[in-house]
Structures are given as structure tokens and as C-alpha cells.
Image (tube, grey):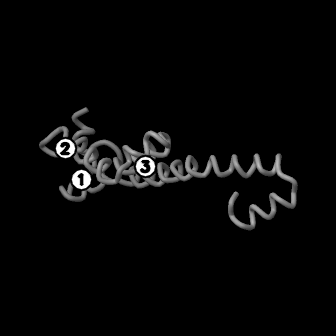
Amino acid sequence: MEKKRADYADEDVLANFKRLGQTVKTLRIHELWEKEPALAYALFMVLMKIDRMVNLLRQNKSPSNEAFQDTWDDCKNYLDLAEAVYLEPIAARRALAELTLPANLYKAAKAKKKL
């Protein structure tokens, strides 16, 4: 735990929790949680990784736990997961429309970008 704390916090062992709590509140991610919990969680994880990078860069120190490149990769992966969660219901609506709408109505709706 001490090793991870060195990457995420400073002399205040709870610093990252405090910063992230404030960031979640500022960005209103907690409001998104009720409607889209998976998307809110993925966005939170992106913020957590960004916070780690800023903490390390601000203190001009090398990571103690995982390589800096791993954090970049994690951040990109969480963004990809957030996008997948966001797009999943859109894809489901399109698939349902293809199955239930006559072809001409489906094409018209798609052309108007309602699907």
C-alpha cells in the first residue's frame, strides 16, 4: 500500500481521494452515476489515472508501482471502455430498428441520424 500511495498521494495519504472527490463533484460525474453508472465509473477511472500522472509530474518523481507508460495505456483503455459503454445502447437501438422497422423507414431514420 505504501508503494501505491507514493504514486497517488503526497504527505497526506488521502490526498488523491480528496482531489478526486472534488473533481467528481465539479464535473458532476456523481449526477451521471444514477443514469449511467458504468460510464460514470469509466470516466472516474480516467480521472484517477490522470491524477496519478499529475501527482508524479508535479513532484518530479519516478513511479514506485507501475511504469508511467502503463498509466498512459490504462488511461487510453478506460477512455475506450467509456466510449464502448456510451455507444452500446446506440448500437442496440440500431439493431432493434433493423429488425422491427420496414427497410425504407429504417433507412429514412438512419439518414436523419435518429438511429
Q: Which picture quadrant has residue 27?
A: bottom left
Q: Secondary structure at mark 2?
A: helix
Residue 15 got which mark?
A: 2
Residue 114, horizontal then vertical, whole percent: 68, 60
Q: Are marks 1 and 2 in contact (CB under 8 Å)?
A: yes
| Mark 1–mark 2 distance (CA, rounded to whole Å) | 10 Å
Rendered image quadrant of residue 110: bottom right
Q: Amino acid at mark 3?
A: Leu
- Element type at marker 3? helix
Mark 2 nearby-residue class (10 Å; few <14, some 14–19, many ≥20): some
Nearer the viewer's eye, disc 1 or disc 2? 2
Q: How much space separates mark 3 and mark 1, taking CA atoms?
A: 18 Å
Query: Which residue is located at x 65 percent, y 51 percent?
Result: 90
User: Percent position (x, y) of residue 43?
Assistant: 43, 49
Numbered marks: total: 3
State the SS at label 1.
Answer: helix
Quadrant housing the C terminus = bottom right
Residue 8 place in picture, x, y as percent: 25, 45
Neighbourhood count class around disc 1 (C-alpha, 10 Å): few under 14, some 14–19, many 20 upward = many
Please tell me which of labels 3 and 2 falls first in the chain. 2
Query: Which numbered mark, 3 or 1, is in the foreground of this view?
Result: 3
Q: Earlier in the sequence, mark 3 or mark 1?
A: 3
Pointer 1 residue: 55
What residue does disc 3 label?
Answer: 43
Q: Residue at x 21, y 54 (%)?
A: 61
* Three-letter code, disc 1: Asn
Query: Where's residue 68, x and y in %?
Result: 35, 53
Query: Residues under labels 3 and 2: Cα distance?
Result: 19 Å
Q: Residue at x 56, y 46 (%)?
A: 85
Residue toward you, 28 or 58: 28
